[in-house]
C-alpha cells in the first residue's frame, strides 16, 4: 500500500495548494491591483495618470448584483430613488500604498448631520499588524457627514475622514490613509444638477501588516459600501432618497458577511498583458468512478479512504497559516467561558475534513479525534461540526445570497442531533442525509473513559440549495467550524472550544470560494507491488522534498499519452512548463531541475493528451519545496 499512503499523505499535506486548477467561471469576490513605479501617482483626485487607464475596474450599481456571494444593496430612507448609486472602482499599488480610484455618478452630492443622509464610502481593511486571528476590522469612513456642522456640510464642502486614524492634524494618521476629492458640480447645493464626484485615495498598508512588495504576492482583505443621499439641499420631501450598494460587506467596523480579495504581485504591472487567473481557493474532486458511500457515519467506504482532506485543530497556528488565500487571516478559534471561567483545554478540538461530489450531491466527512465525547444540547459544550453554505438563488432582505448553517452534534445517546436548516433539508425536503458514528471505545458523557472520538457523514443534494442539475458553475461558498465540549467530573475543569476554517458561521467573514471540479477526480493509485494500470491519471509525489537542485516526480498513466509538467508559484503564476513527450501507460518518473528558480514553495501538476480518443486529463496538484 506504499503508493496509496504516499498520495494520501501528499493530498492531505498540500490540499490547500490545489486551488490553481483552471476555472470556467469568473471570481466576483476578487480583483487585481497592478503595480506601478514609485512616483507614478499624484494624489489630487483627478485620476488623470495613464496608469489608471490600465487599472482593473469594479462596478457597483444599486439594484444589480455587484458580486456574489454577499454583495448587496438597500434603501436607507425617503422615496424610491430616481438617481441610484453607480460607482466605478479602480486599484493600483505603488510601494507600500494601495491606491483606490473611484468615480461616483450622482446628480445630488453632499450630506447632513442626520443618520444615513450622506454621500460617502464606508470601508474595511482588516489589521494584520496585530496577532489576533481572525484579523480585526479597521473602519475607514469618508463621507459628507458631520454632526458638528463643519465646512464639510457647506456648499462646495468636501468629505471628511472618520473612523480609524481620521485625525488630519496627526501626520501618522495622514500617512496611514489619505484622499483627495474633486466634485463635478457643487456639493450641498441642488440649485444645479451635479454629475459625479471623483476620489483618489491612498492606504499605507505596511502600517496594517500587509507586504505589497512580497515577491510571493499578497492578498488584501477589503470591503466597501457606497452611500448615496439625494435632494437634501434644500430638503425636498417629494424627491429625497437615500440608498447604498456594497461589495461583499456593507460595514466597516465588523467582519460580517464576506471579504473581497485584492490580489497584488510586484510582477503584475500596468504592462502585464494577460493577468494571472484568479482561481478557486480550494477544489472539491469528482468521485464519479466510485460507488456512493452508505451514509452511516463510519467513513468506511473506499471513496472516503481515497478522498483528499485537510485538518482543523484548535491551537495549531502553523496549520492555520498553511491555509490558502486569506484563510490564515479569516480562520480562527474561540474558547467560551463556562460559568464565567476558562478552564485549561487539555484535549483541544481536532479533526480531519474530507469531501468530494458525485453528480449533484456534495459529500462531507469528518473524522473527529476526541478523548472526552460529550452529548449535550448546551451550545458552548457541544461536540459537532457546523457547515455554512450559501444558497445559489435565494436572497435575503439585503439582496445577498442567503446563507445557512448546517449544524450536527452528538446527542446524549450518541446519535446525530441537528436542527434549523439541516433539519429542513433532511426531514422536510429529504434532500440531505446525515449520520454520526462513535469510534471504538468511545462512551458518551463518561469523563472517566478515554474516548477515541466520532465521525460524521453528510450528503447534500445541491439542487435543494438552488443549484441547477449539473451543479451550475460548480462554485460553493463554504465555512467549517468544529465544536469540542469536554464535560469533566469536576465541573470547574469543564470547557468548550471551537475552531473554524475560513468562515465561522453563515453571517461571518469570509466564505471560501470552493470549486467542484468535474475534471479533478478522486484517485486510488493502487499498491506498489501490483501497480497495473490505474483508472485515473495521477501524481504520486516527488522525492526528495525539499530538494536542491533537482527532484523526481512520480506519476501514473492509465494509457499512453503526451504528458506536460506545469510548475506554479503560490500566487498561481505558471513559472515553467516541461513537455515530457509520449509516455506509455503505467508508473513513470520525470526529473525537474529548479536551478533557474528562487528558493520557495512551488506547486506542480501534470496534463496529458491521451494518444487514443482525443481525451485530456489533469492531475491533482503536488507541493514541492526548493531550498538553494
Image (cartoon, rainbow, N blue to C red):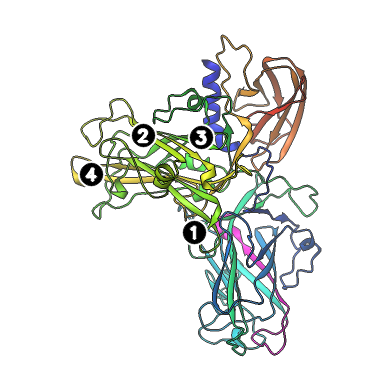
Please report whichever mark, 2 or 1, sits nearer to the chain's N-terminal start: 1
Tell me if mark 2 has few (under 14), some (14-19) or many (20+) residues whose alpha carbon lies within 10 angstroms of its own: many
Q: Give the camera-side residue of 453 and 173.
A: 453
Q: How far across and how far down the image is residue 79, in percent? A: 58, 79
Disc sitting over residue 229 in the figure: none
Residue drawn at point x = 71 percent, y = 29 percent? 594
Residue ranking furthest to the top: 529
Q: Secondary structure at mark 4?
A: helix
Dots 2, 1 in contact, CB < 8 A: no
Membership of 51 in magenta stretch: no
Give the residue pinned by disc 3. Answer: 355
Please report whichever mark, 4 or 1, sits nearer to the chain's N-terminal start: 1
Residue 518 found in image quarter: top right
Residue 603 found in image quarter: top right
Q: Secondary structure at mark 2?
A: strand
Whether 27 is drawn above or below 138: the answer is above
Amino acid at each position: 500500500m506504499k503508493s496509496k499512503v504516499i498520495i494520501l499523505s501528499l493530498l492531505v499535506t498540500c490540499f490547500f495548494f490545489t486551488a490553481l486548477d483552471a476555472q470556467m467561471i469568473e471570481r466576483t469576490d476578487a480583483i487585481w491591483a497592478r503595480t506601478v513605479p514609485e512616483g507614478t501617482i499624484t494624489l489630487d483626485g483627478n485620476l488623470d495618470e495613464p496608469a489608471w487607464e490600465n487599472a482593473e475596474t469594479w462596478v457597483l450599481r444599486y439594484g444589480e448584483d455587484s458580486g456574489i456571494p454577499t454583495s448587496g444593496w438597500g434603501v436607507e430612507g425617503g422615496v424610491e430613488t430616481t438617481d441610484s448609486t453607480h460607482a466605478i472602482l479602480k486599484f493600483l499599488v505603488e510601494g507600500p500604498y494601495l491606491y483606490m480610484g473611484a468615480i461616483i455618478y450622482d446628480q445630488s452630492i453632499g450630506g447632513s448631520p442626520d443618520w444615513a443622509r450622506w454621500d460617502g464610502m464606508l470601508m474595511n481593511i482588516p489589521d494584520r499588524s496585530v496577532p489576533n486571528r481572525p484579523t480585526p476590522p479597521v473602519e475607514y469612513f469618508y463621507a459628507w457627514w458631520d454632526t458638528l456642522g463643519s465646512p464639510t456640510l457647506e456648499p462646495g464642502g468636501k468629505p471628511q475622514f472618520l473612523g480609524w486614524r481620521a485625525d488630519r492634524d496627526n501626520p501618522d494618521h495622514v500617512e496611514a490613509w489619505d484622499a483627495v476629492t474633486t466634485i463635478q458640480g457643487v456639493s450641498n447645493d441642488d440649485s444645479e444638477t451635479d454629475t459625479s464626484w471623483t476620489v483618489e485615495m491612498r492606504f499605507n498598508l505596511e502600517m496594517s501588516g500587509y507586504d505589497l512588495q512580497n515577491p510571493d504576492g499578497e492578498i488584501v482583505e477589503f470591503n466597501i459600501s457606497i452611500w448615496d443621499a439625494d435632494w437634501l439641499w434644500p430638503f425636498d420631501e417629494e424627491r429625497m432618497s437615500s440608498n447604498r450598494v456594497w461589495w461583499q460587506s456593507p460595514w466597516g467596523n465588523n467582519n460580517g458577511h464576506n471579504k473581497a480579495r485584492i490580489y497584488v504581485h510586484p510582477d503584475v504591472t500596468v504592462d502585464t498583458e494577460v493577468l494571472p487567473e484568479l482561481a478557486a481557493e480550494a477544489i472539491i474532486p469528482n468521485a464519479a468512478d466510485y460507488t456512493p458511500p452508505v451514509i452511516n457515519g463510519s467513513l468506511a467506504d473506499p471513496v472516503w479512504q481515497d478522498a483528499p482532506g485537510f485538518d482543523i485543530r484548535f491551537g495549531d497556528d502553523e496549520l492555520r497559516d498553511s491555509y490558502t488565500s486569506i484563510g490564515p487571516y479569516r480562520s480562527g478559534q474561540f474558547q467560551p467561558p463556562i460559568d464565567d471561567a476558562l478552564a485549561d483545554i487539555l484535549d483541544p478540538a481536532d479533526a480531519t475534513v474530507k469531501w468530494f461530489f458525485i453528480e449533484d450531491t456534495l459529500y462531507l466527512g469528518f473524522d473527529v479525534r476526541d478523548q472526552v465525547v460529550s452529548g449535550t444540547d448546551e451550545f458552548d459544550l457541544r461536540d459537532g461540526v457546523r457547515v455554512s453554505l450559501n444558497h445559489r438563488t435565494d436572497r435575503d432582505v439585503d439582496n445577498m445570497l442567503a446563507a445557512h448553517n448546517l449544524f450536527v452534534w452528538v446527542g446524549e445517546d450518541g446519535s446525530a442531533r441537528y436542527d434549523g436548516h439541516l433539519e429542513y433539508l433532511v426531514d422536510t425536503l429529504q434532500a440531505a442525509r446525515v449520520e454520526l458514528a462513535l469510534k471504538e471505545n468511545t462512551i458518551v458523557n463518561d469523563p472517566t473513559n478515554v474516548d477515541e472520538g466520532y465521525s460524521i457523514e453528510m450528503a447534500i443534494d445541491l439542487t435543494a440549495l438552488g443549484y441547477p442539475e449539473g451543479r451550475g458553475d460548480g462554485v460553493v461558498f463554504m465555512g467549517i467550524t468544529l465544536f469540542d465540549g469536554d464535560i469533566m467530573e469536576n465541573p470547574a475543569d469543564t470547557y468548550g472550544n471551537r475552531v473554524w476554517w475560513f468562515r465561522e458561521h453563515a453571517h461571518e467573514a469570509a466564505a471560501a470560494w470552493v470549486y467542484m471540479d468535474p475534471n479533478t477526480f478522486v484517485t486510488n493509485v493502487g499498491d506498489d507491488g501490483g501497480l497495473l494500470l490505474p483508472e485515473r491519471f495521477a501524481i504520486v509525489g516527488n522525492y526528495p522534498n525539499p530538494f536542491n537542485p533537482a527532484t523526481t516526480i512520480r506519476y501514473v498513466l492509465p494509457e499512453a499519452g503526451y504528458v506536460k509538467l506545469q510548475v506554479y508559484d503560490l500566487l498561481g503564476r505558471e513559472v515553467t512548463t516541461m513537455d515530457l513527450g509520449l509516455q506509455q501507460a503505467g508508473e513513470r518518473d520525470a526529473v525537474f531541475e529548479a536551478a533557474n528558480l528562487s528558493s520557495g514553495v512551488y506547486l506542480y501538476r501534470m496534463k496529458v493528451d491521451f494518444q487514443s480518443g482525443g481525451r485530456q486529463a489533469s492531475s491533482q496538484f503536488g507541493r514541492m519545496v526548493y531550498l538553494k
